[in-house]
Amino acid sequence: MQNPIISTLLVIAVAALPSAARADLPELSLALPYSSSVSNAGPGFKLGSTPLVLHTGVATEVGYDSNVLYDPVPVAGAVMRLRAHAALETVSYRAPDGETESVPPVVAFRLGAQVEYREYLTASSQLQASRNFNVLADTSATLYPRGRISLTLSDAYARTSDPVNVENTHNVVRDLNRFGVVGRWRANGGSLELSLGDIVHVSYMGENAHYAFASSYGTEAQAIARWWILPQTSVALSVRAGYYRYPDNPSQDSAPVRVLAGGSTLLTSWLGASASVGYGNSFNQQGPSYNNAIGSAEIDFYLPWAAKLLARYEREFSPSVFANFYRDDQFAVAYKQPLVAHLSATLAGAIYLRTFEGLISPALINAVSYSSTTHTGPIYEARAEINVQPIRWLSCGAAYTVQADTTDFVFHYASFSTADRYLKHSVFGRIDVAY
C-alpha cells in the first residue's frame, strides 16, 4: 500500500519535469485513507527584507477505519493522525504593479520538513503496536528559474512505518531517498521546452526481517520535449529509461523503458482534453517482463457554477516488492462542486484492473505457495469529501472512503491459508492550520 507521504515524495522528486495541465481535482492512488493534503502552504511569514518566506502548520485528523490492516478478517479501530510541517522558500517572482520589466531571480529554492504521528485509539493490542512516526524532508534549488536555460537540483527523503495487508500485519519500516537533476532549455518565447533529467533512488527496508529482500537502488534518465502550438494546446514526447537493482533478490532486477507521445488542449472554455500513447518494457532480468502499450486519455469539463468534472483512463506498469511488475488499467472519474462561499464538495471513484506478474518466491515472505502464478483482481475505490476554508490559513474537512479488493488470490502458509481480498470503510475529520 502506498503512503501519502511517499506519494508526495515522488511528486517532489520530479516536480521540475513539465506536465500537461490538469483540472484541480483529486487523484485517487490507493493510498491510506487520509486527506491527500500532506502539507499546505499558507501566506507565510516574510523574513524582513530578504526574499524568503517561512511556512509553518499543524493538522489533526481523527476518524474510524473498519479495516486498518487491509485484511480479509478486518480489525477496526479509531485513528488519530497529528502532523506538523515547516518550509523555508523564496518568494515567487512577481513584477511590481505598473512595472513592465524587472530582473528575474537568479535562484529559487525550498527547504521543508514534516513529521507525522499516528495513534490507534482502540483496545486492540495489534493496532496499538502499529502506532508510528513518519518523517519527510525535501529540498530543491533552481538556477535561473525564469531564464532560457535553467537547472534544478532536488532531494527528498521519507521514513515511513505502516501496517500492510496479508503479507504482514506489523509495521513495515521503509527509508526512501530520491535525488533529481533536471536541466531545461526554452526557445521561441517559451513555446518550445526541452528538458533532460535523472533521478537516483535508494529504498531501504532492511529493518524488517521479512522485507530485507525488497531493498533496492536505481536510476532513471528522462528526456521530454514540449511544444505549445497555441496558448492552450501543446504536444509532447518523452523517453524514460532506468535501472533497478535488488541486492538481496537479483531475480527482480529490471531496466524499464517508456516512450510516450501525447498532447493536451482546451477545446472550448468548458472542455479540455489530453491523451498520450506509447510503449513500455520492464526488461526484467528473470521471468516475465511487461512488453506492451502504455498511455492515458482524459476529458475535463468546466461546468457552470465553477464545477469541474474529469474522466480518465490510464495504462501503466510499475515495479513491485512482491513481483517483477504490476500492470494497472485505471478508470477514474472525479467531480468538484463549490457549494457556498469557502465550501466545496468532491466525489471521486476509480477501478484498477491490476495484475502482478513474475511473483517472488513464496519462501521470501514465509509462505509455502500461491494459489496462482499471477495475482489478478479488480480494486475499487470511492471517496466523498467536503471542505471549508473560511480564511487562507485555516481549512476543515470530512471525508468518507471505501476500498475493496475482490481478487481470489490466496497465500498458502504452513498451517493456514489466507486470501488477499479486503473491504475497507473509513471516515475522517480534519483541521489544518497552515501559515
Image: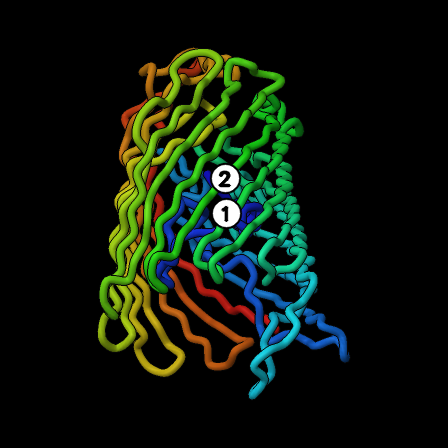
Identify the image quadrant of residue 329. Answer: top left
Find out whether the residues at labels 1 and 2 contact each other: C-beta distance under 8 Å: yes
Residue drawn at x 40%, y 42% as measured from the top left: 237
State the image coordinates of residue 26 (x, y, percent, origin top left). 38, 57
| Dot 1 or dot 2, earlier in sequence | 1
Residue drawn at x 38%, y 15% as measured from the top left: 288
Say which of 379 and 77 sits in front.
379
- Quarter of the C terminus within the rendering: bottom right
Residue 257 visible from this viewpoint: yes
Type of the residue with mark 1? Leu
Q: Residue 223 bears which disc, if any?
A: 2
Give the structural element (helix, strand or loop) at label 1: strand
Give the answer, above or below, for where 327 lies relative to 157.
above
Residue drawn at x 32%, y 49% as measured from the top left: 263
Give the structural element (helix, strand or loop) at label 2: strand
Give the answer, above or below, for where 132 lies relative to 284.
below
Left or right: 410 as drawn, with respect to 301: right
Q: Residue 194 bears which disc, if any?
A: 1
State the image coordinates of residue 391 (x, y, percent, origin top left). 50, 81
Residue 421 visible from this viewpoint: no
